Amino acid sequence: MKLIECVPNFSEGRRQEVMDAIVNGMKESANVIILDVEADPSHNRMVVTMVGEPQQVLNAMKSGARKAVELIDLNQHQGEHPRIGALDVVPFVPLFNVTMGECNELALEFGQWMWDELKVPVYLYAESARMPERKRLPNIRKGEFEGLREAIKEPERHPDIGEPVIHPTAGATAVGARNFLIAFNLYLNTADKGVADKIAKAVRESSGGLVNIQAKGMFIEEKGLAQVSMNLLDYTKTPLYRITELVKMEARRFGVEVVEGELIGLMPLGAALNSLGYYLQIPKLDANQILDVAVLSRLAESQDDEQQQ
């Protein structure tokens, strides 16, 4: 069996009926497993994590895209998280028996469908990027939906798929193949977004911080706290504990502390073990030392033995 992960980000985190319509449409249109749905009103964004066979995931994404374009009007949208589209970003991630090249082909097929069927222009990012500067989402999102209305007409901002004009309500969409990404946020015991901005600048790769880290300062209204919002692009090279400790260190410069962490969506077990081993000072912590993993592994082996008999 070939399995991929897809983690579409929709620009809606407040209207439950809209979020339900999108997710239910994806479930009903294809044989996929929805592993997680995360949404919050401050970001005004919903992140769906699903897995399935490539064609089934593609079918589910088409249904989700139709609903998003039908029900989300970015002219009426406000939120802390940067966005260019109602369906803002669609990453295809290889899981089992699938190559990055196959995910790239799927991204191109979906991107072309977005333009042909919905007239939403598409920017290709990550491993699908046709220009080096478009590998990173912040470069594509520069100016967001409002700024892209005019910027898309400039030759250097033309979309990779479609004509240089945004959809009037759904904007544009970034589509690509990539490896695992971990969305991880840290809250500070201050409401000062400026402090979070300065910490984010010290942490992110683009301004001299840690490699594979994208970071942005935000204010989360429902908590009344500033947040350092981060994307970790390669946890094997830059582990979660290193990010956390650096944010803590930078926070102390401003007399504030980290009070809470937040994981958006899912992360690989290896990422959790890496940080667990660091904080427990177990340098060679192995997945098979986790009871749940050991039990599931043994059950899977027993099932394989029964099928072979």
Image (spheres, helix red, strand yellow):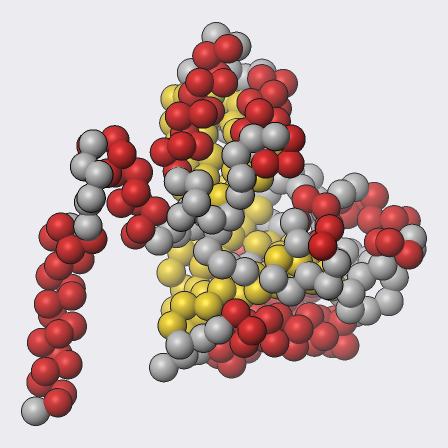
Q: Residue at x 66, y 54 (%)?
A: 135
Q: Residue at left 82%, top 49%?
A: 148
User: Toward which corner of the image does residue 103 lie, by quadrant?
Assistant: bottom right
Q: Residue furthest top?
A: 255
Q: Quadrant of the C terminus?
A: bottom left
> Which image quadrant is residue 89 in?
bottom right
Say if 64 sits above or below 117 in the image. above
Q: Is residue 179 left or right of residue 79?
A: left
Above or below — where is 81 with respect to 1? Answer: above
- Could one spot residue 217 in this view of the protein? no
Q: Considering depth in this image, is 107 or 281 the residue closer to the camera?
A: 281
Q: Height in image: 53 above or below 216?
A: below
Q: Residue furthest bottom?
A: 309
Position of residue 67 measured from the top left corner of the image (x, y, whole percent): 62, 66
Image side of residue 40 versus residue 265, left or right: right
Above or below, comparing residue 80 to residue 195 in the picture = below
Q: Quadrant of the N terminus?
A: bottom left
Q: Residue at 39% x, 52% y: name it.
A: 266
Q: Is residue 273 visible?
A: yes
Identify which residue, 117 or 16, lies in the foreground.
Answer: 117
Q: Position of residue 58 (x, y in %)?
A: 55, 75
In the depicted view, which residue is nearer to us: 83 or 234? 234
Q: Position of residue 215 (x, y in %)?
A: 57, 35
Where does the image place residue 37, in percent across and percent down from the top left?
A: 44, 54
